[in-house]
Image: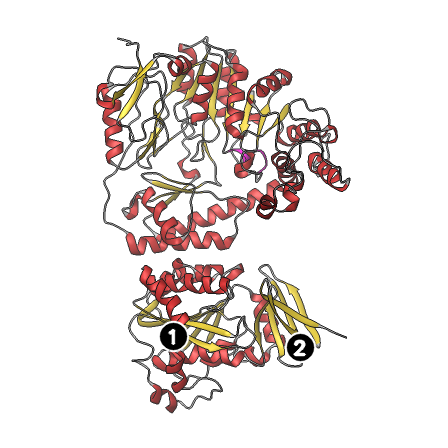
């Protein structure tokens, strides 16, 4: 038993009391419990707009919490096994930015895998830090990027002893974990902090037989998307810190970019969701794992599909695997993942989380029931019956080692010009080029554009991948630095 | 004492039935189950507060969902019934000596137990030796069956709640696969009258039209269902519901009915203009 009674939810309780006290509002928000905006009440309901209120003494203030929000943060820290926890209302993007800004100053080096979320590289634009990329292994057969090998991190640390931090995906979008405990030991032995992007790892803190969580592994900070597997409202998140961080300083960093009018809907949802997971998380996630295991068994029985899981573990680039992730390789029925993704939505009214060239990922969570799982399995069986093809040209992503010539921040703010893409070889890119699948940046601000990269972009476009990032949506032109780095 | 059961047919319309007493109330892992006794309709079963059947008018529904396909395909030997925990469809099927096997898939065992105890009028033939009951999700059951049934009767609840999966394209597609080459699927097709029901009806029709070469709709009058005007879907790989009707053969079977006749069979496929329009608009989309 910890210091706190986890069945309490201080922000939720304060809001309930506040509602019962029927305070007359002469403060913002101007809709005044919805009276000024009946259409909004119609949409959201009176309870919802009734607690859309401003910071005030009985409800505390997220920028400088001293009462109920502070208590909610301390309770969350206890629930997650962190030294301190911050309630975040700007999405996990904001948590990731705050992590990076808390440990990296302008010019600092940070070691990270290339398959990071774009919010990480955006954080480098904000902080002025320089990325040292670790090449993630690829699984050619499945067409997915894996975790970082310890040996690769060792090499990056050895070659960059002045780096200040290592960032780790725990897990990747596809549920793959690197050996976080060993990476933490290695980084700490070299005076580096460890940051974990746990956008897909909330359940690691509560479920049994899960990969190790960042806080348990001794990481210094973790960005946890409570709204993904944790059940809180979209845009709400936690930033967790370990004992070697100064919470006061981290709070100052958060306040640089976070709103001063935090939504109590988001805060209360974090509070209630933390309570739910602290009290019932173990059973909830056992159920989620059970549903995912059942679905895998049934999908593999259909034939042609390959729903994979912990059998992939190789104790290195796939150190562990998140068993709640339902990822299905579709190449065996002659269809690309993205094609199955589209068929599920257009023909069967089923929306899955992602479809790439080789896989679909169905997000299974605490909100799922057997009956929806049955629909997904049956729809996949039907897709095989009606749409299977004999073969499909296999697409493999070659990992292209980026050459970082300028820090993302310098590149982002530098003088630039727009050139037709075929004239950009040898220049430094000032924007992102992302390709879905598989979502790894092909180019990030500050990187050299090579002939190999241009060939890859042309190939991916031809294959019908959706490309995002550049100012020119057709990717006919790219923004490059005016200055030429020969 | 005023004791009424009320069901909202729309947010602005409700049907109320005076109740003598409540015979049963329970919560299964899927839904709330209630059985009442009433002066006008006799005993009736509700699931999550929605009317499933009354002793007084259930014959209409059960005869129409069973005898229409059986009069088109009297040679059907293997039949699958999905849902139908009250046993009414099985009772009608059991009247055919030619049927060798009746598989019934019902997700909720508690519904069957309650009906056996309180509604013997419908559940009385569940003990027929040809009947095998599977307590599982209909969608799961059908997934692994191929070229097996001559007739599938989908006696589902509404397209929300536990019956939701039985109104999906994946389910109808799986049924197609589970049927033999001249197989027929008949389903409870909702009502065309009130807005929300009509939408459900349209959606179901679209998905069936996508899955079967022959897809027609027929109607019956069921007093305790919303608007009283109810539809059934007749989907088939080979037989047309009217051109291939074998009324004389069916009559020779000597099956007693109170609602169904081969003459009514033909009439039931003659739909009101607005219903024809509603279905046609769906068919033209595909």
From this view, report whether residue A41 is shown above or below residue B209. above
SS of the residue under disc 2: strand
Label 2 resides on the chain identified as B
Q: Residue at x 61, y 15 (%)?
A: A249
Query: Could one spot residue A436 in this view of the protein?
Result: yes
Q: Position of residue A47 (x, y in %)?
A: 66, 45
Tell me where the magenta segment starts and ends, as one range: A201-208
SS of the residue under disc 1: strand
Q: Position of residue B21 (x, y in %)?
A: 71, 75
Q: Position of residue B134 (x, y in %)?
A: 49, 66
- Horizontal side of A338 relative to A43 (left or right) equals left
Viewport quadrant of the N terminus of chain A? top right
Q: Residues within 10 Å of mark 1 (few under 14, many from 20)?
A: many
Q: Position of residue A240 (x, y in %)?
A: 59, 25
From this view, report whether residue B28 is shown above or below residue A115. below
- Horizontal side of A379 relative to A50 (left or right) equals left
- Label disc, if present, on residue B78 of the rendered structure: 1
Separation (CA) of disc 2 from disc 1: 35 Å
First reached walking from the N terminus: tag 2 or tag 1: 2
Q: Are marks 2 and 1 on the same chain?
A: yes
Q: Nearer the viewer, residue B230 or B256?
A: B230
Query: Could one spot residue B186 in this view of the protein?
Result: no
Query: Residue B234 lies in what quarter of the image?
Result: bottom left
Q: Nearer the viewer, residue A129 or A301?
A: A129
Q: Which residue is tagged 2?
A: B37
């Amino acid at each position: 038993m910890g210091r706190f009674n986890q069945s309490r939810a201080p922000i939720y309780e304060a809001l309930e009391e506040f509602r019962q006290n029927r305070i007359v509002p002469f403060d913002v928000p101007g809709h005044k419990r919805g009276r000024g905006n009946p259409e909004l009440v119609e949409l959201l309901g009176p309870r919802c707009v009734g607690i859309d209120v401003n910071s005030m003494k009985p409800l505390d203030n997220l920028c400088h919490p001293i009462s109920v929000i502070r208590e909610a943060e301390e309770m969350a820290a206890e629930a997650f096994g962190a030294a301190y926890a911050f309630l975040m209302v700007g999405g996990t993007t904001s948590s990731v930015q705050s992590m990076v800004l808390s440990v990296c100053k302008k010019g600092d080096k940070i070691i990270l895998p290339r398959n990071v979320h774009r919010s990480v590289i955006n954080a480098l634009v904000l902080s002025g830090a320089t990325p040292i990329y670790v090449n993630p292994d690829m699984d050619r057969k499945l067409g997915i990027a894996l975790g970082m090998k310890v040996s690769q991190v060792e090499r990056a640390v050895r070659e960059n002893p002045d780096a200040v931090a290592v960032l780790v995906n725990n897990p990747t979008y596809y549920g793959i974990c690197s050996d976080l405990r060993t990476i933490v030991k290695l980084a700490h032995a070299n005076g580096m902090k460890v940051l974990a992007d746990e956008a897909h790892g909330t359940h690691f803190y509560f479920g049994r037989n899960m990969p190790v969580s960042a806080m348990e592994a001794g990481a210094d900070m973790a960005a946890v998307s409570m709204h993904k597997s944790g059940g809180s409202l979209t845009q709400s998140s936690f930033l967790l810190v370990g004992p070697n961080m100064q919470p006061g300083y981290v709070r100052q960093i958060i306040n640089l970019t976070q709103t001063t009018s935090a939504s109590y809907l988001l805060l209360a949802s974090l509070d209630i969701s933390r309570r739910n997971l602290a009290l019932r998380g173990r059973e909830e996630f056992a159920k989620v794992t059970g549903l995912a295991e059942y679905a895998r068994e049934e999908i593999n029985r259909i034939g042609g599909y390959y729903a994979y899981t912990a059998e992939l573990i190789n104790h290195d680039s796939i150190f562990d695997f998140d068993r709640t992730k339902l990822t299905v390789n579709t190449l065996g029925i002659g269809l690309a993942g993205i094609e199955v993704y589209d068929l599920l939505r257009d023909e069967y009214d089923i929306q899955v989380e992602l479809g790439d060239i080789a896989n679909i990922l169905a997000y299974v969570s605490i909100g799922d029931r057997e009956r929806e799982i049955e629909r997904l399995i049956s729809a996949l069986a039907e897709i095989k019956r009606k749409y299977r093809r004999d073969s499909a040209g296999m697409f493999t992503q070659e990992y292209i080692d980026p050459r970082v010539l300028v820090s993302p921040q310098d590149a982002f703010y530098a003088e630039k010009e727009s050139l037709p893409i075929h004239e950009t070889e040898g220049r430094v890119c000032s924007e992102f080029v992302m390709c879905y699948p598989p979502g790894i940046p092909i180019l990030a601000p500050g990187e050299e554009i090579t002939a190999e990269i241009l060939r890859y972009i042309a190939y991916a476009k031809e294959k019908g991948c959706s490309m995002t990032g550049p100012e020119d949506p057709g990717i006919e032109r790219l923004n490059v630095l005016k200055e030429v780095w020969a | 004492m005023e004791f009424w059961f009320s069901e909202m047919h729309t947010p602005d319309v409700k049907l109320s039935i005076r109740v003598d007493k409540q015979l049963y109330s329970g919560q299964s892992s899927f839904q709330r189950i209630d059985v009442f006794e009433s002066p006008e309709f006799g005993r009736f079963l509700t699931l999550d507060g929605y009317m499933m059947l009354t002793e007084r008018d259930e014959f209409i529904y059960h005869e129409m969902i069973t005898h229409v396909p059986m009069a088109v395909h009297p040679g059907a030997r293997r039949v699958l019934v999905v849902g139908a925990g009250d046993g009414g469809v099985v009772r009608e099927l059991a009247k055919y000596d030619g049927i060798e096997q009746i598989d019934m898939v019902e997700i909720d065992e508690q519904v069957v137990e309650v009906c056996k105890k309180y509604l013997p009028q419908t559940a009385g033939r569940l003990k027929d030796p040809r009947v095998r009951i599977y307590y599982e999700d209909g969608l799961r059951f059908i997934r692994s069956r191929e070229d097996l049934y001559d007739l599938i009767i989908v006696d589902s609840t509404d397209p929300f709640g536990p019956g939701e999966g039985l109104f999906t394209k994946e389910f109808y597609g799986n049924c197609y696969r589970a049927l033999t080459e001249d197989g027929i699927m008949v389903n409870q097709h909702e009502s065309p009258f009130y807005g929300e029901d009509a939408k459900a009806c349209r959606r179901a029709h679209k998905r069936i039209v996508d899955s079967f070469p022959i897809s027609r709709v027929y109607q019956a009058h069921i007093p305790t269902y919303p608007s009283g005007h109810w539809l059934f879907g007749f989907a088939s790989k080979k037989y047309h519901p009217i051109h291939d009707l074998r009324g004389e053969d069916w009559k020779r079977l000597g099956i007693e009915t109170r609602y169904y006749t081969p003459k009514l069979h033909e009439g039931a496929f003659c739909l009101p203009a607005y219903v024809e329009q509603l279905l046609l608009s769906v068919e033209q989309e595909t």
